[in-house]
Image (tube, helix red, strand yellow):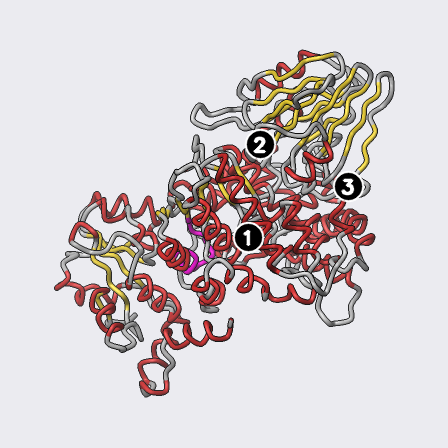
Amino acid sequence: MSDRYVLVEDAIADRREGRDPVAGACVVVPGSAAGGPAELVGAIVDVLIEAERAGAACVLLAGEKRDLDTAVAAVCRYVVADRPEVLEEARQLFGPDRVQQVESVAVDQIRSWIRQIPVSSAESVRLRRRVGAVAGQLKSARSIYGRMRRRRT
Amino acid sequence: MQVERSRRAIGMCGRAGPGDATRVDTMSELLGGVRSLFEGTMGALRADAGAVRWPGTRRSAVSWSPTPLPANLPPDAAAAAEHHDAFSLVTDPTSARMYAGVSGAVPVYADMDAGTSDGVFFCTRLEPLARTRGASLRPDWHAWAHILAAGGPLEGRTTFAGIHRLQPWSRVSVEAGGRPAMTASGWPWLEVAQSGSASVDAVGDALAHVIAELSSRSAVASLLSGGWDSRILAALAARSAASPGATGDPLVAWTTSSDTGTVMEELVAAKVAEHLGVRHRVLPPRHEAFAEDLDYFARSADYQTSFHVWLVPLARALVGSSATVLDGLGGGLFVGGAFPDDESGRPAVDQRFDRLARYLKGAEEILAPGVVAQVRERTWAAFEQVAEPLAKHPFGSTFTAYLTRTLPGISLAPYGLMASSAPVATPFVNNAVVTAALAIPPELHRAGRLYPQLIRRTDAYLAELPTAADLTPRERQLPRRVSSEAAARHLRDLVTREPVRELLAPGLAGADIGVWRRHLDNTRHQHLIRGLATLSLWLDHYADVLSSADVDELMGRG
């Protein structure tokens, strides 16, 4: 378990400014009804690829049922919801292993439940390594991505 | 056979040679009422879509394919098979001939030993043949051994003894008063000569031509994953959709989860779709629908494989679509050089068998020891028949994998599952594409190195974009649907029913659900459990017509 998280819009901004946004942090994605992204387009895809590559969990804040029916929701590892009907639908869609009930899906309440999000042992090891390492010694997912592109040429 | 009102029965059935006319009527009803294209003493053919009558011939002749054909075909069955991968039935007053397509990827099943007549009854689905057979309907336990070990029945066997799947380039002749004769000799793909001057450009040109032709006949839909094959097809389809000769319908790309513990496939597919400017639909499987999806897939694939249950959400979404669905079948083999031999010095045939039957490694944790031995022995016996003649062919590993894995198992995803929803095309097994690819020496195919060259012609960005496989970390974190508690309970319920229960390793039937979930998180064990579940569903589905349902033969007691 980890209490580190980054909102997806902040991760996009970090990335734009050259920082590695997802090291050791869950990526939290607000539902589309609350203004979060619905489609897998633009910078969000790069952030989610980096998160997936780093083993970081991506968590959807589902305030309404329609938040569950988007392309972005389809690639989130976990869903948190605070309303019974949303929880029920999320469990049917994603399965109980991927759904957590929380008091509130408000962004300012994330810290109260983020530690409930399961982190596998492999991920914990990776996160500890990343958090404990000197930033300059880490290769960001983006740099790996770039290296792979070059290798193919 | 249940034909759902919402599912389109894209299929074909008929008779070659003399025989009971009412059997074709019944088969047609079981397919959902496909229309008669011709009915004569020496043959009959019914199809609801995809059939083209030959013009200007005194014979009765029809070609058929689940891929839209040109409105006019030359009256030449070999040409229809080679250039359009079409099945043809040609009859005259004294004979009938059936011709399978050059790829063999489209399943056409034939009851070669109906016992009641000299004719051969055929169908694109097994169930109409099985339920109208009349004669004793027995399981083919060799086929079931192959399904468990390799993912599909080898040597053209099917789950029913006596009913065969036509192999690539096979022809069946029926003369009045004679017995049916079948041959598959002269398959042109085995004769392609390699050339040092062959280039990937010819492969690209052939693919582009195939997709441009398809796009001029119908709208096209792309099944887009994070891999090379679907990316190449989507890029070519996007270009064709924008060309003057196309139908004008926008290309839509469809992606679902392959349930392998990562969402990288969906994410890389999204990058590709956005770059191509095509609409992208991502449809995850519903967790609660696992049991329904398993049953839907098993029925669609005629219970012969369980490789692509995860594709069902896309098949459901595409029901009734008029767009031709592009599937990358065969790309990994004929272009990507998948399943190469290693340098260990072990005999090639042994290596190839171990790759095919890798699911048997550790199988004693799932199957009773005697069953493992039976499954291995029966699979090896059939495999050897296919693989030995190919042992020294330059593309021996490619053809062995094609004939023992791609055709028996994988092909049923496009041509069993998807073809139940919409027209389907598999451009990588088009004759011109395969011929061009096989002209390139095998060593140049290794490790997928032709892919970036192939797509760079169309799109330099996509040539540089890593695939999902490149980016996926070794540790996969996403909980899988197939190993969820609900799925594990359903699978355990299926495989602990009699008689399948007898095939299980000691103690497994009574093991708690946690043990089953751990097995389902192991790819090899999961494969075996899915295969056993498919057997259980099949025995249940055909309980009213099978002459025997005991599994003694698989236990070595037959």
In the foreground, B69 or A19: B69
Residue B291 in view (yes/no): no
Looking at numbered disc 1 in the image, what kind of residue is underneath it? Gln
Badge 3 local density, few (<14 within 10 Å), some, or many (20+)?
A: few
What residue is at 66 percent from the left and 66 percent from the top? B444
Q: Earlier in the sequence, mark 1 or mark 3?
A: 1
Image-quadrant location for residue B197: bottom right
Query: Which residue is disc 1 drawn over?
Result: B526
Residue B557's tag is 3
Q: CA distance from mark 1 to mark 3?
A: 26 Å
Secondary element type, mark 1:
helix
In the foreground, B492 or B288: B288
Looking at numbered disc 3 in the image, what kind of residue is underneath it? Arg
Residue B70's tag is 2
Q: Can you tell which of label 1 and label 3 is closer to the viewer?
A: 1
Q: Is residue B126 magenta?
A: no
What residue is at 70 percent from the left and 45 percent from the top? B145
Query: What residue range appears in magenta?
Result: B255-266
Residue B107 in view (yes/no): yes
